[in-house]
Image (cartoon, rainbow, N blue to C red):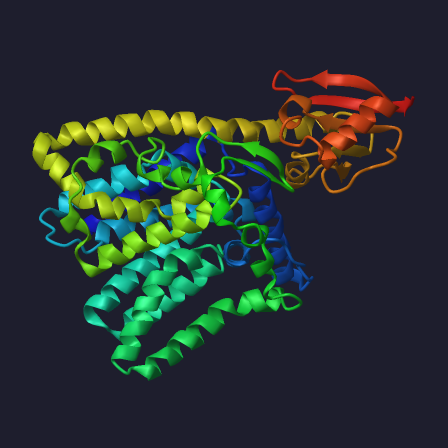
Amino acid sequence: MKKIFPSFIVLLIATAIIFLTKFNGLYGQDSHEYYRYAKALLTFFETGKNPGDYFWPVCYPLVAAGISFVTHVKILLVLQFVSVVSLALVVWVVSNWNFENQKSIKIQLAFALIAVGLSPFMLREGIVCMSDMLSIALVMLAFYAAQNFLHAEKIKWLCLFSVFAALACTTRYASAVILLPFSLLIAYRLVLNKAYLKFLPILFIASICFAPHFFIRSHSPLAFVQHEWLNEWSAANFFERDFTTHDGTTYYLLPNFVFVLVNIVHPHFWVLGVPLLFFIKREDFSALVPRIIFISVLLYAFFLAGIPFQNKRFLLMSFPMVAILFYPAFVRLLQATNKKNVVYSFVLVIHSILFVSAFKEFYERNSLEKNLTALVQTYPDTLLYTFDIDVAMKSYATTKTIHNLWQQKYEVFQIPALVLFNEKKFQTQWRGKNPMLNWNNLKKNYQLESLVKKKDGWELFRIVSKK
């Protein structure tokens, strides 16, 4: 029961944050798309109406839709619930991890809670309606099953590894990269032991787990291999920090090969990273499982380094594994300071402060989406041209007909109509792209009446006439 305690605390804290802030888990375009498709799947369960397709893997919205269908709980709340429970599962795996020469279970449980469960970025992602935390939980459960299989080689652990690994890949495709080393090692063990028949349950389980993907994506089941990240992946991107893609031009502080390792030392992941570097020893990587985890982390970092894009959210996938690798160093830190409670308190206080600063961004965006939707609804015009905020408005049931300024270049705009735009925010990243081309066309060729101007740069206009 002790090993469940950290997960229970994380559940309570995450639930309290959601209750106190009334944060509904929607942040940015991705979360709204998960919400849209989960609703479409729920409608499919209830009426048989084809849910259509969408861009990402199907597992996360499918799980939420299934739970909502059975429990009749609102789908948005279920999406958030899945993320919260997933965070608790990640903490459970770290709490139950079989460390070599483990001397104190209390230290391990404290580490799982304060270093992983209350990591500012992990806790924030645990209350958002995104697939990240579910995929991380499934990867960690797969790692846990792999560790146990390598120690005991029981069929139940092999089957569990297959289940969690397959589901992880149908939650986020990039999970396959970080799972590859353990998958190859297990396959090697089976071949070495001539246990060929054990491949049969693996294939059977994988086929069941991937069935929803092939059912929904029957017209193009392998379309994900044409993902822009794979098409634009290049070793040349390792040393770049400025990128121009179909998403515009972005500028970053660090080159990719440095950025992909910042989850080791960035304080918003944890404040322990830098001090623990001084307590790492070579022997921490001498055993087989830590070596495979180390390879998995490096392989995933190698994959991310070749992508012409940076997002700290993607580094969350490997962060719990980084924490597991650093656990022996954490024990040495406590031994060196001989003040465990001081270390625990310090980490808790700093992580709490950093969580507030990290969560503020999500909370403000969530509020912005609600407020802009409410603002637009106050005007009688039926047509709206906008960008970036349009997906959120559909989640909040706007009655406006929305035209996205990114999807196409408009030669002619309808009159009258509303335009919601943030020139200050978009002018650099989207220079020469549809959003700015359309906006410049509007300013040059149409008479615009400014209706409302927000401090953060968003401005609502009405297209009055053509110049």
Quadrant where the image shows the C terminus? top right
Q: Which residue is at the front of the view, 185 or 114?
A: 185
Image-based side of 445 in relation to 24, left or right: right
User: In the rendered image, is residue 247 in sight?
Assistant: yes
Q: Position of residue 121 (x, y in %)?
A: 39, 36
Q: Which residue is at the front of the view, 308 or 326?
A: 308
- Give the quarter of the image for residue 264: top left
Residue at the image point whose x is 82% and y is 33% from the top: 382
- Give the quarter of the image for residue 42: bottom right
Q: Position of residue 81 (x, y in %)?
A: 45, 46
Residue at the image point whose x is 73% and y is 27% from the top: 420
Residue at the image point whose x is 16% and y is 38% from the top: 279
Q: Which residue is at the front of the view, 243 or 94?
A: 243
Residue at the image point whose x is 26% and y is 37% from the top: 114
Image-based side of 265 in relation to 227, left or right: left
User: In the rendered image, is residue 82 in sight?
Assistant: no
Q: Position of residue 396 (x, y in %)?
A: 65, 37
On screen, 210 above or below 415?
below
Q: Position of residue 367 (x, y in %)?
A: 57, 28
